[in-house]
Image: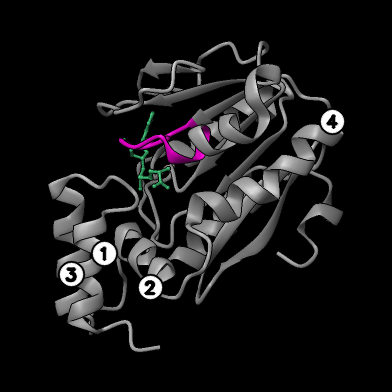
């Protein structure tokens, strides 16, 4: 599959299946034309998965989460860093209906017409009371990742965070040189956390999760 095919790129832009804003489409174009760069944007990953007819990132994570939410009979989930398009929360709500209350939080402006999802325009700080949620989930929430792990560990709330493929600053402000050093820091700092490499199509990144709620067996084959 030649993903560097201009016709395919143009189809993706015309169809815009993930409702990207112009800013996000610009990132797809940038990574398409400058593909010798070592790291690519999430939006380009989304383009490649679409071109390869693989599940989108939110579908892949959502399909992983659905049996866990059902098996645990969870009824309230918080997604932190849902992004402009709120795709993961929307997907979960579409599959679960109103049996599970989904709250989608981000500091950015969000476009979501789905009245079944509670939208919270808020910058997560880690000081929030999370006890109303059965679990906290996040897909590549950048700087919020460590805040989520820390807050959920402190409040004993199950969490599962797919980490970014680039390092983000530690709570001390230190920025690791490479992503594996950041992952190692998170694991050693939050000793009760579990870690796996998350594979999605031809891409992979770290995934950190609580030892309770997100049983290891669910990660077999991910
Ligand atoms: C790389 S984007 C990922 C968006 C979406 N989850 C996805 O996978 O496409 C990271 C998102 O996390 C949000 N974010 C970062 N730090 C945050 C915080 N402290 N509180 C809430 N949202 C945050 C950003 O605004 C951004 O929308």
Q: Residue at x 64, y 35 (%)?
A: 95
Which secondary structure is most common in the magenta stretch?
loop
Q: Is residue 139 left or right of residue 153?
A: left
Question: Of callouts 4 and 3, which one flags the residue occurring earlier in the amino acid sequence?
Answer: 3
Q: Which residue is mark 4?
A: 72
Q: Which residue is mark 1?
A: 12
Image x and y of residue 150, in percent: 59, 32
Magenta segment boundaries in residue numbering: 80-89
Which element carries disc 4, helix, strand or loop? loop
Q: Residues within 10 Å of mark 1 (few under 14, many from 20)?
A: some
Residue at left offset 43%, top offset 36%: 144
Disc 2 target residue: 51
Marks 4 and 2, how far apart at CA: 35 Å
- Label 4 neighbour load within 10 Å: few <14, some 14-19, many 20+: few
**Residue 10 - label:** 3
Nearest-to-viewer mark from 4 and 2: 2
Between the residue at mark 4 and the residue at mark 1, the CA separation in whole angstroms equals 37 Å
Does the closest atom of ligand 1 sit within 8 Å of the Cβ of label 3? no
**Which numbered tag is attached to residue 27?**
none
Quadrant of ligand 1 in image: top left
Residue 219 lies left or right of residue 115; in this view the side is right
Q: Quadrant of the C terminus?
A: bottom right
Please say if 160 is above or below 178: above
| Disc 2 crowd, CA 10 A, few/some/many (<14, 14-19, 20+) | some
Query: Closest to the observer: 41 or 211?
Result: 41
Q: Can you tell which quarter of the image residue 164 is in?
A: bottom left
The one of 57 and 139 positioned closer to us in this rendering: 57
Label 2 element class: helix
Question: Residue 113 at x, y = what percent?
Answer: 36, 23
Q: CA distance from mark 4 to mark 3?
A: 43 Å
User: Residues at badges 2 and 1 in contact (C-beta under 8 Å)?
Assistant: yes
Give the camera-side residue of 85 and 219: 85
């Amino acid at each position: 599959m030649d993903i560097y095919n201009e016709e395919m790129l143009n189809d993706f832009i015309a169809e815009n299946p993930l409702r990207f804003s112009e800013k996000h489409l610009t990132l797809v174009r940038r990574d398409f034309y400058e593909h010798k760069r070592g790291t690519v944007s999430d939006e380009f990953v989304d383009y490649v998965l679409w071109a390869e007819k693989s599940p989108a990132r939110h579908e892949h994570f959502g399909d992983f989460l659905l049996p866990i939410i059902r098996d645990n009979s969870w009824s309230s989930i918080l997604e932190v860093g849902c992004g402009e398009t709120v795709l993961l929360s929307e997907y979960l709500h579409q599959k679960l209906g109103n049996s599970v209350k989904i709250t989608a939080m981000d500091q950015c402006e969000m476009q979501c017409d789905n009245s079944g999802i509670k939208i919270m325009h808020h910058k997560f700080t880690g000081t929030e009371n999370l006890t109303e949620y059965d679990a906290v989930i996040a897909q590549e929430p950048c700087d919020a990742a460590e805040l989520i792990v820390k807050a959920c560990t402190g409040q004993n709330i199950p969490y599962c965070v797919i980490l970014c493929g680039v390092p983000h600053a530690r709570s001390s402000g230190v920025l690791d040189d490479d992503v594996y050093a950041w992952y190692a820091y998170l694991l050693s700092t939050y000793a009760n956390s579990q870690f796996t490499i998350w594979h999605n199509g031809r891409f992979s990144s770290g995934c950190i999760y609580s030892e309770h709620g997100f049983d290891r067996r669910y990660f077999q084959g991910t």
